[in-house]
Image (tube, grey):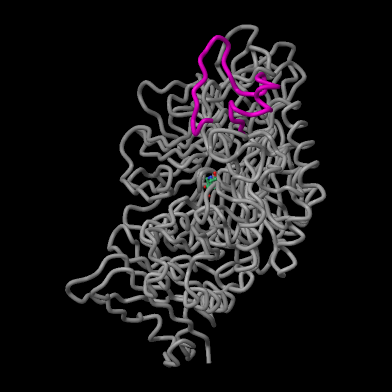
């Protein structure tokens, strides 16, 4: 059991394996937050009244909304800080948002809102439903707290029902809000851009509000809907860390605000700038789900909690427990593909021991460059004269699987689809249309567009024996106006776009049940829990420079498991024939599911033999890479070296894979101590690569590694308990 309700005190305690979350209904009316942290005695966890001049109260209650830690801060209710929900009555125009506690219940499993991606429940999952009402508007608000005890995660989402006579407008929706006592903390989040995703930034919280967000219609390369709030001194192993993630792939907002009461308020959700939603009388709205975890033992454990949660509750059933090592055609040929070339490419991939050949962009319509063809989802007859099905049969005769690239959400102006249906794109009345990569964004909120796509893909891929789909998305939204929605619903266009995308993902998963989806948005532009719900892995970045990759991969592990992080060995700068560089690239790529992306037809036999050996080596460690516990050791942005290890358990582990990756050369030799704290001090281990023996105590104290005078230097150790 993980949810405890004390009806006498109107108090709720949520418990996970190592954390505890407590709140109560003050005066039987207001859900106020009391505690989130390590499990401890509830004695002394009490509401402490704080009052401040210029904070308002009701004369009969002495309750100050502006100073209290709140479970759901409401706009216009006397709380002047950033708030989670803003609701406007379309009858009176008032945006004073107010809800009072009515009842609560708990149940096994969870409530799963229609059409939204959300975490899967298991036998240990429990949910608390808190019902609040607003007598003035007649609205009912149900707050959900779903507890995933094994991963130390609690999720938050809500459903708003308009039971009143007048219409309402939701003007801000933040399903997750958490008030943490104290404001001397740091915030960790991602920043980046195309080809440089998920770099880590850490800065002290300032007085005021710090926001990260996306207004691009996708969760974006630039920030991701993930953040941490930590002690100032928190390290990988020590100190407190709270981590937050959002099961959503569109526009979002994350806020961290400190205030006069020295409180840190964290909010995560759909925001207010790019979202508003008309809730007509009789309608209801369900928010996406946001998740949080807490670690008393450093940032590393907060990440591992997220990893465990995403693996167990978000990612789809793994259709390939041993992931296919793919060879992708993009960096090999770009748009210059045809049946003959792809057959030869696949045959060579099979000879190297790869499992799958992926035909990237360029196979359909008039798509010979990025100027035409998107939207016309039939095989280009010049390139595939006898169609896709016989071609794929020929490729697979070599004993290799077949994957194909699609970009369903987009259309080129030069396409049959756009000429026939200009009304299918997002476009604002009377405005010029911005292009990006010569393409427009389809109006995925329009059911007709979804029908078109489903019919086109059913016809083109329905009878083709595909094993994998790479789903790309190569531009952000502009002219965010859905011609299929009435004027009063235009604030919902980007939100409903995402629901359309998720609907199409579900259609693919249902209609191609054995096909694995790899998500991509110009690399990692939609690297979020919404996409992870439908895609087993995500192309982490278009940047295949191994040096840049160390930054991107290191950052990604803060919020997401390595099993999702698709990593390819590329021929960036044509260095593939250099044995040291090829080895380095492989060791960098061994951080997640492995793949290759270069013209294997034009490399030497030595390179091909090396690849076969690399794949065998990857298979030896794959279980650890996909399902092991991940520990960061060195941050490449701090010291030019990336080091980490996988272990089969968080403590007293019996198997480790340790990697040291040095980007730049070192004139003077430097040494680094790599401490494997998950080792069992009383056990003995052997490194299966060098044959050297180590005691667990030695591993805990640290392996000493010397840097090399040349850059792109890598070392791997594989320790197993004797
Ligand atoms: C962007 C992706 O990230 C690349 O890997 C490739 O698929 C291209 N799109 C194709 O247009």
Predominant SS along the magenta part: loop
**Residue 340 located left or right of residue 476:** right
* Residue nearest the observer in this picture, 288 or 298: 288
Residue at horizontal 47%, vertical 91%?
684
Q: Position of residue 411 (x, y in %)?
A: 61, 31
* Residue nearest the observer in this picture, 209 or 261: 209
Please identify the residue farthest to the left as the structure is shown. 668
Please identify the residue farthest to the top as the structure is shown. 92
* Residue nearest the observer in this picture, 279 or 349: 349
Residue at horizontal 51%, vertical 24%?
478
* 439 in relation to 235, above or below: above
Q: Position of residue 342 (x, y in %)?
A: 63, 57
Quarter of the image with the N terminus is bottom right
Q: Position of residue 262 (x, y in %)?
A: 36, 39
* 210 in relation to 399, above or below: above
Residue at horizontal 76%, vertical 48%?
387
**Residue 442 located left or right of residue 386:** left
Bounds of the magenta segment:
410-438
């Amino acid at each position: 059991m993980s949810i405890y309700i004390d009806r006498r005190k109107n108090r709720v305690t949520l418990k996970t394996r190592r954390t505890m979350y407590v709140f109560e209904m003050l005066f039987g009316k207001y859900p106020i937050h009391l505690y989130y942290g390590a499990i401890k005695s509830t004695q002394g966890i009490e509401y402490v009244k704080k009052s401040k001049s210029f904070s308002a109260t009701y004369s009969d209650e002495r309750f100050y909304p502006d100073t209290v830690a709140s479970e759901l801060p409401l706009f216009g209710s006397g709380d002047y800080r950033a708030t989670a929900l803003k609701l406007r009555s379309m009858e009176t125009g008032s945006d004073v948002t107010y809800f009072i506690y009515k009842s609560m219940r708990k149940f096994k499993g969870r409530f799963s809102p229609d059409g939204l991606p959300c975490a899967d429940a298991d036998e240990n999952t429990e949910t608390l439903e808190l019902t609040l009402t607003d007598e003035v508007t007649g609205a009912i608000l149900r707050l959900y707290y779903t507890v995933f005890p094994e991963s130390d995660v609690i999720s938050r989402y809500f459903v708003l029902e308009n039971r009143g006579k007048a219409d309402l407008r939701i003007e801000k929706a933040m399903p997750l809000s958490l008030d943490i006592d104290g404001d001397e903390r740091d915030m960790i989040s991602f920043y980046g851009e195309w080809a440089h995703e998920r770099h880590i930034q850490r800065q002290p919280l300032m007085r005021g509000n710090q926001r990260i967000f996306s207004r691009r219609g996708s969760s974006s390369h630039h920030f991701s809907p993930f953040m941490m709030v930590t002690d100032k001194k928190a390290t990988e192993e020590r100190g407190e860390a709270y981590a937050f993630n959002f099961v959503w792939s569109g526009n979002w907002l994350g806020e961290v605000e400190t205030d006069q009461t020295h409180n840190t308020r964290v909010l995560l959700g759909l925001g207010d700038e790019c979202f508003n939603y008309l809730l007509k009388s009789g309608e209801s709205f369900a928010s996406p789900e946001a998740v949080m975890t807490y670690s008393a033992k450093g940032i590393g454990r907060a990440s591992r909690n997220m990893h465990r949660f995403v693996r167990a509750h978000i990612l789809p059933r793994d259709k390939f427990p041993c992931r296919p090592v793919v060879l992708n055609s993009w960096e090999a040929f770009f748009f210059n593909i045809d049946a003959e070339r792809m057959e030869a490419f696949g045959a060579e991939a099979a000879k190297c021991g790869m499992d799958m050949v992926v035909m990237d962009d360029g196979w359909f319509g008039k798509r010979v460059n990025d100027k035409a063809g998107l939207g016309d989802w039939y095989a280009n007859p010049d390139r595939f004269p006898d169609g896709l099905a016989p071609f794929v049969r020929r490729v697979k005769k070599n004993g290799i699987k077949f994957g194909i690239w699609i970009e369903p959400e987009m259309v080129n102006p030069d396409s049959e689809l756009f000429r026939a249906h200009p009304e299918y794109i997002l476009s604002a009345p009377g405005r010029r249309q911005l292009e990006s990569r010569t393409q427009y964004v389809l109006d995925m909120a329009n059911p007709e567009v979804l029908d078109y796509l489903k019919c086109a893909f059913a016809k083109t891929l329905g009878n083709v024996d595909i094993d994998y789909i790479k789903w790309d998305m190569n531009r952000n939204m502009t002219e965010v106006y859905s011609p299929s929605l009435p004027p009063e619903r235009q604030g919902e266009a980007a939100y409903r776009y995402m629901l359309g995308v998720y609907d199409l993902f579900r259609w693919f998963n249902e209609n191609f049940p054995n096909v694995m989806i790899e998500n991509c948005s110009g690399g990692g532009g939609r690297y979020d829990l919404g996409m992870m719900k439908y895609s087993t892995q995500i192309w982490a970045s278009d940047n295949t420079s191994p040096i840049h990759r160390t930054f991107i991969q290191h950052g990604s592990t803060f919020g997401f498991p390595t099993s999702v992080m698709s990593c390819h060995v590329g021929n960036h700068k044509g260095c593939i024939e250099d044995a040291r560089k090829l080895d380095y690239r492989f060791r960098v790529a061994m951080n997640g599911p492995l793949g290759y992306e270069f013209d294997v037809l034009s490399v030497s036999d030595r390179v091909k033999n090396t690849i076969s050996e690399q794949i065998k080596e990857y298979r030896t460690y794959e279980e650890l890479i996909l399902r092991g516990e991940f520990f960061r050791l060195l941050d490449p942005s701090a010291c030019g070296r990336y080091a980490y290890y996988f272990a089969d358990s968080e403590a007293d582990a019996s198997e480790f894979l340790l990697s040291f990756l040095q980007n730049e050369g070192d004139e003077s030799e430097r040494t680094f101590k790599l401490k494997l704290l998950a080792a069992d001090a009383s056990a003995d281990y052997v490194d299966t690569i060098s044959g050297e023996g180590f005691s667990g105590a030695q591993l805990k104290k640290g392996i000493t590694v010397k840097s090399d005078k040349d850059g792109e230097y890598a070392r791997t150790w594989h320790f197993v308990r004797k």
